[in-house]
Amino acid sequence: MRAMLVSGGWGQNIGNAFFNLAGKHTLEAAGFDVSFVQDSPAYWTFRNEAKGAYPHAWNPVEHLSADLLVLQGPLFTRNFAKIWGDVLRNLRQLDVQWAALSSAFRKYTEEEVEVLRSVVAIHPPLFISTRDRETTNRIREVFPEVRGGVDSAFFLSWAYAPPALRSKSDDFITFCFDHYGEPRLVKNPKGNITIDGATYVAEHSSYVDRFGAKSKGHAYLAHALDMRRLPSRLGNLAIVRPEHRTNPHIPQKIYKRSGGVASDEPWTYLAVYANTTATYSDRVHACVATLAYGRPAMLHNPGTKRSSLFEAIGVQDIFVRPVLIPRSILEDAYEDLITYLGRFT
């Protein structure tokens, strides 16, 4: 079966690329013939999603030859029907089906459930596989055949093998913070964070955290006003500071401190997360990618419901300490997904 896998939004959030790449791999491993295709222009940074796609935009999804359109990520929003309703109707007239992989609601509201209900009633999907239990439970009201799954990005190590570091002297730790301020890790024998044999506690800037969590705009301003002198090293480890949003590109934020790294492609980030000693971040997919490559990660983002995807893979303690996922658990989840997807090829 020929499938078009929607991808994009890498500049707004490079984490999208992580589940795009791994999602393509899992579909191909199950027997699909997969091609990437552009995501809807409705998702661009300065576009109001409620207006849907731009009226004069040419949509390749409706013109390229395929049997199936596969959507990914937290796409089930209040605007889902406005963005995808006409596309799904036009594809149905061409005998092209649709499906959702590694899918989720964005805010988990009743409105989002009802919007999805209205779409499924008119355009039944071939399959829906989710990335967290709350999404699965809510979708079951609408589409009883829904499969509870995990985020595709947990399978990155099957999709891409980054190069290794040159030597032990190049070891580093990763801090990736966007909405919240980067914490200062302070040695403490009673700490809950163990890195490279030392124990630490995290000291957060309450002002930066409270202000930056309000919105993307507030986050940029909070980082600009954060005048703390943060270290370039943690013990023997250099600190690398990836920035997951490069559109808009704000070098004053990205390179404000040592170790800044940003790119409009995912390979650089994957090399970081595959080689890091540990990742401490408020970015969900910074942690997912790190765990996918067998490295420890800890998440500081108490306000995001997207973090529920960690419960689906059994690492809900990621909020209180760095965690690892045993390879056997990833392998079982991978094989289960490939077997499931193989039913539809």
Image: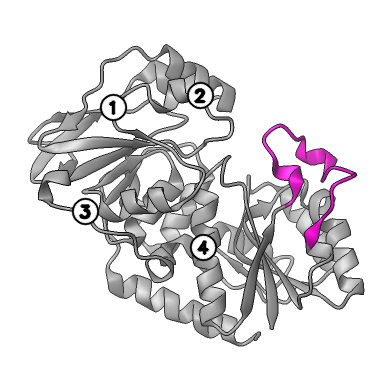
> Looking at numbered disc 2 in the image, what kind of residue is underneath it?
Ala
| Position above or below: 343 against 125 | below
Q: Are marks 1 and 2 in contact (CB under 8 Å)?
A: no
The residue shown at (15%, 35%) is: 200
For mark 1, give the secondary structure: loop
Extreme residue in the front direction: 166
Q: CA distance from mark 3 to mark 1?
A: 19 Å
Q: Are marks 2 and 3 in contact (CB under 8 Å)?
A: no
Asked whether, in this view, residue 26 is left or right of residue 70, the answer is: left
> Which residue matches tag 2?
219
Q: Nearer the viewer, residue 252 or 309?
A: 252
Mark before the other along the chain sequence, 2 or 3:
3
Q: Quadrant of the C terminus?
A: bottom right
> Which residue matches tag 1?
258
- Which numbered dot is residue 78? none
Q: CA distance from mark 4 to mark 3?
A: 22 Å
Q: Nearer the viewer, residue 315 or 97?
A: 97
- Is residue 210 visible to us here? no
Mark before the other along the chain sequence, 3 or 1:
3
Residue range highlighted in magenta: 40-60
Q: CA distance from mark 1 to mark 2?
A: 19 Å
Residue 4 in percent (x, y) is at 69, 69
Asked whether, in this view, residue 60 is left or right of residue 180, the answer is: right
> Looking at numbered disc 1 in the image, what kind of residue is underneath it?
Ser
Q: CA distance from mark 2 to mark 4?
A: 28 Å
